[in-house]
Amino acid sequence: MEIVKQIHLQELITSFANKDVYIHLETTNGSYASHFNEGFFNVGAFIRNVVVKFELGKVTGESPHRIGLKLPSGWIYAQGITHYKLDEHGRLLMAGLDPEGKLAVALEISETPFTY
């Protein structure tokens, strides 16, 4: 993955607009983090292979970036995106990595279901 180049990432997101696409979105602050620190409040969110058709996709802010996908009846967004990659299967993979390189947020867009 490479550090976000806002104009290039915007072009990639726009290439998925107005198509039925599969979304993968997850947040994490460390799986099983409460196991190591009983006082730690562990949270996360996860959706996978939800089909949407977004009208507009936007990359905003300085790094870390916010990615918003405007749907006919609302928004999907991910805050904290720092890296991205268009993989060999044409999937747009975006991630927010903390200073230690650990995943904090992932937003992925694909024209085919995620199978990994």
Image (spheres, rainbow, N blue to C red):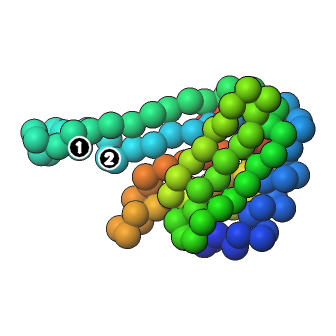
- Report x, y in % for residue 28: 39, 44
In this view of the protein, which residue sits in the foreground, 87 or 80?
80
* Quarter location, residue 39: top left
Residue where numbered disc 1 is placed: 33
* Quarter location, residue 103: bottom left
Residue at 26%, 39% in the rendered image: 42
Q: Amino acid at mark 2?
A: Gly
Count residues near mark 1 (Cα–Cα under 10 Å), then give few for <14, some for 14-19, many for 20+. some
- SS type, badge 2: loop
Residue where numbered disc 2 is placed: 30
In this orientation, does residue 113 appear? no
- Report x, y in % for residue 4: 64, 69
Residue at 54%, 70% in the rendered image: 63
In this view of the protein, which residue sits in the foreground, 40 or 110?
40
Q: Amino acid at mark 1?
A: Ala
Question: Quadrant of the image for the C terminus?
Answer: top right
Q: Is residue 92 above or below residue 74?
A: below
In this orientation, does residue 35 appear? yes
Q: Is residue 21 above or below residue 60?
A: above
Q: Residue furthest left?
A: 38
Q: Is residue 46 left or right of residue 21?
A: left
Residue at 32%, 41% in the rendered image: 31
- Report x, y in % for residue 14: 84, 53
Q: Is residue 100 above or below residue 114?
A: below
* Quarter location, residue 82: bottom right
The answer to the question of whether label 2 and label 1 lie on touching residues, with beta carbons closer than 8 A, is: yes
